[in-house]
Image (cartoon, rainbow, N blue to C red):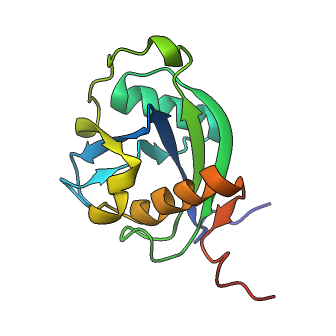
Amino acid sequence: MCPKHHNNPIPTVDTIIEWDSMVLLVKRKNKPFKGYFVLPGGFVDEGEKIEDAARREVKEETSLDIQLVDILGVYSDPKRDPRGHIISTVFIGKIPAYDKYEGEAFAQDDASEIEWMNLRTISKRSFGFDHKRILLDYKKWKESGRTFWSSKDEDTS
């Protein structure tokens, strides 16, 4: 039997959605990082599969139904979120009717607005959490197809 209290990390999800060389970002309505752009995402509910949480969070924040196509990686640096040790599994998603998409996404839930941002401008912008690093990793992933995690480039073992 498990003890009633754990000091375990909390699981979250984030999703990169690309369309026509642009990635979808949401502006946070709440602290931390209120007013900053981040990837759509949030906490995994108890009893929920992580991939279902990713689709739910995207739908709640952007109104889009998406299809998950891959996992970019897992980001677990204990300092990545000021609220505590929060681990994010980062998915890559697409809009199923990609060739017919006409911009029907709109901000809702805890997103105050959305923006399609060109991948080429990522390095010049500020983001909440570690989402700039995640997006830069995504640019590398597009070329290499490799997965990422918080300390992959630092791991020498």
Tell me what residue is drawn at x 32 percent, y 16 percent.
104
Is residue 126 shown to the viewer in this render? Answer: no
Residue 118 position by quadrant:
top left
Report x, y in % for residue 153: 65, 79
Q: How many marks?
A: 0
Q: Give the camera-side residue of 153 and 73.
A: 153
**Residue located 65% across and 84% down the image:** 154
Q: Is residue 149 left or right of residue 86?
A: right
**Is residue 105 positioned above or below 4 on the image?**
above
Residue at (50, 29) in percent of width and height: 56
Q: Which residue does the image show at 38% across and 53% down from the upper left?
A: 120
Which residue lies most toward the bottom here? Answer: 156
Q: Say whether residue 5 is visible.
A: yes
From the viewer's side, name the closer residue of 48 and 59.
59
| The N terminus: image quadrant | bottom right
| x and y, in percent, of residue 66 in the image | 53, 24
Task: Please state if 20 lies on the left or on the right of 148 as rendered.
Answer: left
Which quadrant of the rendered structure holds the C terminus?
A: bottom right
Residue 130 image offset from top left, x and y in percent: 42, 66
Residue 19 vs residue 152, the one in the foreground:
19
